[in-house]
Image: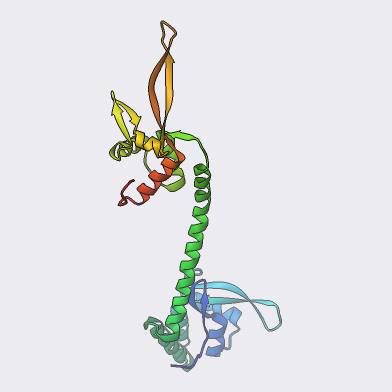
Amino acid sequence: MSNVLIPIQEHEGKTAVSGRDLHAFLEVKTPYKDWFPRMVDYGFVDGQDFSSILSESSGGRPSMNHAMTLDMAKELSMIQRTDKGKQARQYFIEVEKRKSVAPTGPELLALAVVEAHQVIEAARNKVAELTPKAEAFDALLSTAGDYSVNEAAKVLARDHNIQIGEGRLRKKLEDWGWIYRHSGKPRAKQAQVDLGRMTEKARWHYHPETAEKVLDTPQVRLTAKGIDAIRKRMLAPLAVAA
């Protein structure tokens, strides 16, 4: 059936039929404002089978209309028990058949364009979401400070969703050969210090009896450059660390 007997619309992303368009096609004598509520009494549900909308009437004043599903439109057509009702019902059945056939030619191209726009919009939203994090990390890399392993783990989790606690990060550093154990205490490998990835912070305490300053094992710390190298390796686990 090639002729458009009753316009098919899109309402809130779904195929719909105007109640007033169907009412006019069926040539129902009862005014629409009285006819439609009677049809709803057959068991149709507002928000599921139809939605109420305001439309402009010929006199410029708003009038009530309804966006119906194809199923509801078919049932209302059948309820009329007229030739027009049979014609409308058959028309809606043909519409459903056409919708179930795989699109080709211009229809397929139109769907591809819509899908492409959706992909682009999703990508834009993702960029907007990641931009603040990227800017924050760029600011971190521009700093000259250093961070404890615990602080570095928090930065990775907060800015890059790399969920790794202090213990696991410390284990990774040992596995990668960034740190080693000396008398059971972690120390930074000199190669990583030379690369600017790690540093050590001197620590001491005062002897409780002599009050003399006693040097402790230095604290292993990561630079911003080191955190960036960890980030890259964690996001690309197959890459070989330098």
In the picture, the quarter occupied by the C terminus is top left
Residue at (43% x, 45% y) in the render: 228
- Look at 42% across and 86% down and name the residue there: 105
Q: Is residue 65 above or below residue 217?
A: below
Task: Report the colour scheme.
Answer: rainbow
User: For this rendering, which residue is in front, 170 or 50?
Assistant: 170
Residue at (37%, 81%) from the top-left corner? 100
**In this view of the protein, can residue 75 be seen by the observer?**
no
Where is residue 233? Give x, y as percent.
36, 47
* Residue 130 in view, yes or no: yes
Q: Nearer the viewer, residue 23 or 167?
A: 167
Q: Position of residue 102 (x, y in %)?
A: 37, 82
Depicted 158 relative to depicted 199: above or below: below
**Image position, residue 20 (x, y; %):** 57, 82
Q: Nearer the viewer, residue 229 or 15?
A: 229
Q: Nearer the viewer, residue 10 or 174?
A: 174
Q: How many marks?
A: 0
- Judge left or right: residue 169 versus residue 25: left
Task: Residue lying at the far top in this picture: please name it.
Answer: 209
Q: Quadrant of the N terminus?
A: bottom left
At which x and y percent is residue 193?
Answer: 39, 35
